[in-house]
Image: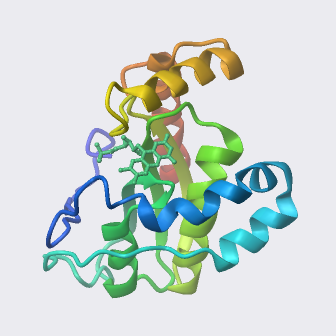
Amino acid sequence: MRRHGHEVETEPIRAEREWSKWLLPIPLLPLLPVLPLYLASGRFRRFWHRHHYQPRQAIRPLAHADLSGFDLVLLGTPKWLYLSYPVARWLDVISGLEGKAVGAFATFCGPPLEVFEIDMLFEPLEARLRSRGALPAGRLGMSSDYHEYFFFGEMRSLFRWLSRKAYGRPLADFTLDGAVGKAALARFCADILRDSK
Ligand SMILES: Cc1cc2nc3c(=O)[nH]c(=O)nc-3n(C[C@H](O)[C@H](O)[C@H](O)COP(=O)(O)O)c2cc1C
């Protein structure tokens, strides 16, 4: 955005107190038994997105707690199955989103699998944005090729395998340094700049 001549201010959303990484997934476990149904049925997904429990985590005071003075807001989050807990809290406390275009971007370990990564994160995120009066304006999902679990990078190995299986490409292609990731980032910026003119 800066390269396109825009003035940009950034603000990290930080948890007041970090939680142990082994506690973070506990509130997410209810999805596991119904995951096959979630993946298979769009109707069930819509139901799940309306009713699932989104954990929240207290965040540190914000320098920009009111965004009404900005032309455009870009919100980034890691995927913690859904929204990360500090970002979910940010969406509760932030003001000035009414009528504001908000582009959302996220990192997750895996390739941008349409349902498991993209919809699972962005559908509830955009619903939350709309409920705050904001206008969702684009999605960017990027692999970090990194996963916190479990002991020997098992989850990362699983996603690397899935990337080859689903796309015939290495997971690295979908990161910020990879060809697909770079193209997705350029498209995201171009679309947002065009639409928010
Ligand atoms: C609680 C939790 C849940 C996660 N869920 C997913 C997931 O559903 N899919 C995925 O690909 N990665 C998942 N990850 C991995 C993170 O999304 C990934 O490592 C992310 O890039 C971390 O970003 P950060 O380094 O900015 O924190 C999860 C990580 C945590 C801690």
Q: State whether residue 110 is above or below residue 53.
A: above
Q: Depth check: give the residue in front, 90 or 120.
A: 120
Seen at 29% across and 80% down, the residue is: 69
Seen at 20% across and 61% down, the residue is: 12
Q: Depth check: give the residue in front, 55 or 133.
A: 55
Seen at 81% across and 55% down, the residue is: 37
Q: Is residue 135 visible?
A: yes
State the count of labels. 0
- Residue 103, image x, y percentages: 48, 59
Q: Quadrant of residue 152?
A: top left
Q: Depth check: give the residue in front, 9 or 83.
A: 83
Q: State whether residue 57 is above or below residue 35.
A: below
Q: State whether residue 25 is above or below residue 98.
A: above
- Residue 71, image x, y percentages: 37, 70
Q: Quadrant of residue 9?
A: bottom left
Q: Is residue 196 visible?
A: no
> Which colouring convention does the figure follow?
rainbow
Seen at 27% across and 84% down, the residue is: 66
Residue 169 placement, left or right of 26:
right
Q: Depth check: give the residue in front, 151 or 193.
A: 151
- Residue 194, image x, y percentages: 54, 51
